[in-house]
């Protein structure tokens, strides 16, 4: 009983500290991810002073749930067809990213002179992005509707597939698999698991929809979490990242009619448990050990930044995107996290150079702080990329912080169709400027029609971004009109806050 009370106090304290630090950072524009990690560093067992959590393992299960919910929610935002529509170009972009970063990491590992086995471990530490942090950044920066986001997701999904292969190759080094046959068997099982989930995502939507078809929100949430956590656990058991298992279940549920309700019902779980994931990571960092290998950490950081930006430029060029999109791709996949730490812990358990643990912790911490700052600054940093390297489109206009909005309602009622027409004018200063269509969260029964811009009209898509001067036409059923107005006004008044909180009030 005493242990349970201590665990509850530690978990509650972690939530409170993360929330208070994040709240303090909002006015000065700091992203939440490094703040959550900083809370773990300051209140963990490796830093002098007050220790909130003396044993990081006490929060490990809750932290893994945070990773599962982050990737599950990301899967809900997309569909299998969206991720596979890039085909060969998407696979090529991911292959270029992996070759550059794994190859650069291997060269760095040999240059450090810690040993051949250590060099292959360093290649994995340096070469693989953090799915959790990338997911969080895409949501925080409201870029889920951006054209380059599908490329970013393709890269991290293929990275996670590559993890199973790479870990299997490292088994002789890490003391796991006894030979190539056992390693090949592990890779085969992992890919078979992912293949089954992909087949279900493409052809099994009808059965999953039937399972989730209920008006009871409690049952919907319980069933969805059961599917996500069970699949994540099965994936982990079979040698696939638990994160990719949760992501695949999200993709499957994204194709069902329940998806909009699930996004609304599960995003508080994503935010809350995601904070504990990053807090738990901070608990494992010992600043003293990190300082001892600081030169190696800085070398690895510089290498990663250069290679990630180069990979972003190549990916953007393959997809006909501009330099802003190139910067967004390269800087978003810059961060490193859970896999780097897991690989370092496996290396230490295998008796490799003990400096690997401190190197991995410091490297991940530096990029976890630098990465989000770079992502938020990508519009400015993109100017340093020569336009001649890309065939892309011009950068979208910046967002204004004002609030004017002209909402013409009821002037064009189409009674014979049972439909009302809303005309939304984005005036200078409106926070609708820069918002993507899929961020408006229009209710069922409300359908975007045409967008008038600069004297022309065009159909809208989920990635269409509103700009000052636009006139958006939205068709809505009369009974849904008040809800549609409230949702649009909520985004207009509160900007990103309304999107985060799912605010549909006036």
Image (cartoon, helix red, strand yellow):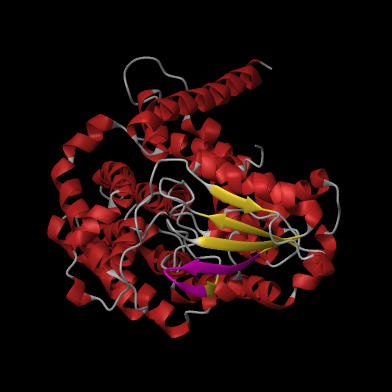
Residue 62 location, x and y as percent? 58, 37
Q: Is residue 331 visible?
A: yes
In the displayed structure, 194 sits above or below 421; it is below
In the displayed structure, 435 sits above or below 451; it is above
Query: Toward the viewer: 248 or 44?
Result: 248
In the displayed structure, 108 sits above or below 392; it is above
Residue 102, quarter of the rendered image: bottom left
Q: Is residue 65 visible?
A: no
Asked if the stretch drawn in magenta spans residue 75, the answer is no
Magenta highlight range? 448-457
Query: For the stretch drawn in magenta, what is the main secondary structure?
Result: strand
Residue 319 location, x and y as percent? 37, 78
Residue at the image position 64 percent from the left and 47 percent from the top: 487
Residue at the image position 15 percent from the left and 52 percent from the top: 299
Which quadrant: the C terminus?
Answer: top right
Which quadrant: the N terminus?
Answer: top right
Residue 407 location, x and y as percent? 59, 50
Residue 498 location, x and y as percent? 56, 41
Query: Toward the viewer: 310 or 285?
Result: 310
């Amino acid at each position: 009983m005493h242990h349970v009370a201590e665990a509850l106090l530690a978990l509650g304290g972690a939530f409170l500290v993360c929330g208070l630090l994040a709240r303090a950072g909002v006015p000065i524009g700091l992203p939440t991810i490094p703040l959550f990690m900083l809370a773990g560093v300051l209140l963990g067992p490796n830093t002098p002073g007050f220790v909130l959590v003396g044993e990081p393992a006490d929060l490990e299960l809750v932290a893994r749930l945070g990773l599962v919910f982050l990737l599950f929610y990301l899967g809900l935002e997309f569909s299998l067809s969206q991720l596979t529509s890039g085909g060969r170009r998407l696979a090529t972009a991911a292959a270029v990213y992996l070759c550059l970063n794994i190859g650069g990491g291997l060269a760095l590992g040999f240059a450090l002179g810690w040993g051949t086995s250590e060099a292959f471990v360093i290649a994995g530490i340096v070469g693989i992005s953090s799915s959790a942090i990338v997911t969080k950044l895409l949501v925080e920066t409201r870029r889920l509707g951006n054209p380059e986001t599908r490329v970013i997701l393709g890269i991290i999904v293929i990275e996670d597939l590559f993890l199973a292969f790479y870990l299997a190759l490292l088994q002789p080094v890490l003391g796991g698999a006894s030979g190539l046959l056992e390693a090949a068997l592990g890779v085969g099982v992992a890919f078979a698991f992912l293949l089954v989930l992909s087949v279900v995502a493409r052809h099994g939507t009808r059965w999953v929809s039937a399972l989730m078809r209920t008006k009871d929100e409690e049952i919907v949430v319980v069933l969805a979490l059961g599917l996500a956590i069970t699949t994540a656990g099965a994936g982990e058991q079979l040698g696939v990242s638990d994160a990719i298992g949760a992501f695949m279940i999200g993709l499957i549920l994204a194709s069902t009619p329940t998806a909009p309700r699930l996004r609304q019902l599960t995003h508080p779980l994503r935010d809350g448990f995601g904070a504990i994931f990053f807090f738990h990571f901070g608990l494992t960092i010992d600043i003293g050990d990190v300082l001892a290998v600081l030169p190696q950490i800085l070398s690895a950081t510089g290498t990663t930044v250069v290679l990630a930006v180069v990979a972003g430029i190549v990916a953007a060029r393959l997809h006909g995107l501009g330099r802003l999109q190139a910067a967004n791709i390269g800087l978003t996949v810059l961060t490193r996290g859970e896999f780097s730490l897991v690989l370092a812990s496996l290396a230490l358990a295998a008796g490799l150079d003990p400096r690997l643990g401190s190197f991995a912790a410091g490297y991940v911490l530096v990029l976890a702080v630098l990465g989000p700052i770079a992502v938020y600054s990508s519009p400015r940093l993109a100017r340093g990329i020569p336009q001649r390297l890309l065939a892309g489109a011009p950068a979208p206009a910046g967002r204004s912080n004002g609030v004017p909005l002209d909402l013409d309602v009821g002037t064009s009622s189409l009674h014979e169709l049972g439909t009302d027409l809303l005309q939304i004018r984005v005036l200078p200063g409106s926070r609708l400027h820069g918002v993507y269509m899929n961020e408006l969260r229009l209710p069922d029964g409300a359908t975007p029609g045409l967008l008038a811009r600069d004297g022309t009209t065009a159909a809208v898509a989920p990635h269409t971004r509103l700009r000052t001067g636009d006139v958006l036409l939205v068709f809505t059923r009369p009974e849904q009109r008040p809800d549609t107005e409230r949702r649009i006004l909520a985004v207009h008044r509160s900007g990103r806050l309304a999107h985060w909180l799912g605010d549909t009030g006036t």
